[in-house]
Amino acid sequence: MLAGVWNGAEYQRRFDSLAESGMDVHGEATFVRAFEPASVLDAGCGTGRVGIELARHGIEVVGADLDESMLAYACEQAPDITWVRSDLAELDLGRTFDVVVMAGNVPLFTPPGTQGALVAGVARHVGNVLVAGFSLNRGYTVEQYDAHCADAGLTLVERFATWDRKPFEGGDYAVTVSRYA
């Protein structure tokens, strides 16, 4: 998976600017909280934006990402959260989580052809549901994602067009909820 291509502080500044303008930058965390999880794996956590917000609501969070700069920023912002540097395809924390979330286009930041390994890597940590949101206009489709989930033993539960649960009717973004059959 890709590493070393980001600057965590610069990446986070974009979200900070959006928040300062009044935009809600916690839609992913709100979506995840609806499942009432006690524990969440923030897979591809980046700067920790989603995981930190979840932890503010009393949820146990573990964040995992390969990029050192992103994780350094996350660690600086929330040293009490467990942050793990790992390729998600190889991630093995030896436990499951109520929700595993891949927010922020995680499958699109892996080398082409490795998305199946990514899904399998995070799927082994699913205790209840896997939630993933990503753009569909970059060469990775919901059909491919669903096939990768099926290969990992997961089935589609529901799909939305946005993190605020607008119905999915095609389009260029999907938020997918999957679980073991």
Image (cartoon, rainbow, N blue to C red):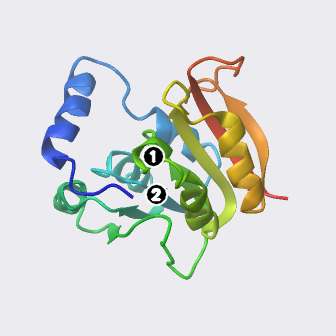
Neighbours of disc 2 within 10 Å: few (<14), some (14-19), many (20+) = many
Percent of width and height locating residue 55: 40, 56
Q: In this figure, which residue is indicated by the disc labeled 2?
A: 43
Does residue 20 lie above or below 106 as drawn?
Answer: above
Percent of width and height locating residue 156: 78, 44
Label 2, secondary structure: give it: strand
Instruction: From the viewer's perspective, tell me whether residue 127 is left or right of residue 45.
Output: right
Neighbours of disc 1 within 10 Å: few (<14), some (14-19), many (20+) = many
In this view, the residue in front, 147 or 101, is 147
In this view, the residue in front, 99 or 135, is 135
Percent of width and height locating residue 42: 45, 56
Instruction: From the viewer's perspective, tell me whether residue 32 is left or right of residue 82.
Output: right
Q: Residue sitting at 68 percent across and 52 percent down?
A: 148
* Amino acid on which disc 1 is placed: Val
Is residue 38 among what the camera can see?
A: no
Does residue 62 lie above or below 50 as drawn?
Answer: below
Instruction: From the viewer's perspective, tell me whether residue 3 is left or right of residue 168.
Output: left
* Amino acid on which disc 2 is placed: Ala
- Asked where in the image residue 120 lies, by quadrant, the reply is bottom right
Is residue 30 among what the camera can see?
A: yes
- Asked where in the image residue 73 lies, by quadrant, the reply is bottom left
In this view, the residue in front, 8 or 145, is 145
Label 1, secondary structure: give it: helix
Residue 106 numbered tag: 1
Percent of width and height locating residue 28: 48, 38
Does residue 31 lie above or below 74 as drawn?
Answer: above
Residue at the extreme bottom: 94
Contact (Cβ within 8 Å) of mark 2 with mark 1: yes
